[in-house]
Amino acid sequence: MFKLVFGIFFIVLGLYFIYLGLKLQRTKDLGLIKNKMVNIDKIKDKDGYIRFNFKLHIVIGTIYTIQGILCILSRYFVSVDNLYSFMNIFVIITIFIYTYKVIFKAPKFKKYH
């Protein structure tokens, strides 16, 4: 039962990230981006910043959705359980990489005067 609830949570979270990324690309509204380290008024390349966040949302959303599907399937199939264990490691590494990008790469879009 735990894997089913956990899998559904990951699928919903992943689809929500994808939805936010597509909404950001469609509306080009910088107010949707919540990053305290970058002031929205001081962004020099707004299109580049939107593309950066769009890619971030799509990749994270896709990985979370796949993680949720594998979590549900691993409940029923043993071979998928091994893949699910590998995917957990992949998700942890991806979270570290994208945390680095948000902390160190996002501020490059900021104007300094």
Image (cartoon, rainbow, N blue to C red):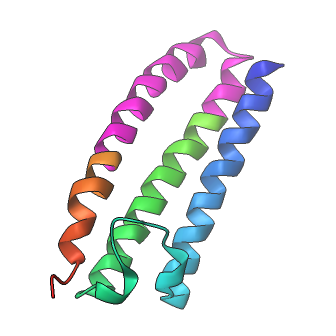
Seen from the viewer's position, the closer of residues 41 and 14 is 41
Q: Quadrant of the C terminus?
A: bottom left
> Is residue 6 one of those drawn in magenta?
no
How far across and down, in percent of the image, does residue 46 sit? 32, 87
Instruction: Determine the residue positioned at 27% across, 66% down.
Output: 106
How far across and down, in percent of the image, does residue 15 sit? 65, 56
Residues in magenta, as a range: 69-98
Instruction: Determine the residue positioned at 73% across, 17% down.
Output: 75
Seen from the viewer's position, the closer of residues 86 and 43 is 43
Instruction: Determine the residue positioned at 60% across, 45% down.
Output: 65
How far across and down, in percent of the image, does residue 107 sit? 24, 68
> Is residue 84 one of those drawn in magenta?
yes
Q: Is residue 95 above or below residue 27?
A: above
Magenta stretch, main secondary structure class: helix
89 sits to left or right of 9: left
Seen from the viewer's position, the closer of residues 8 and 38 is 38
86 sits to left or right of 44: right
Instruction: Determine the residue positioned at 78% across, 27% down.
Output: 4
How far across and down, in percent of the image, does residue 98 sit? 34, 49
39 sits to left or right of 112: right
14 sits to left or right of 82: right
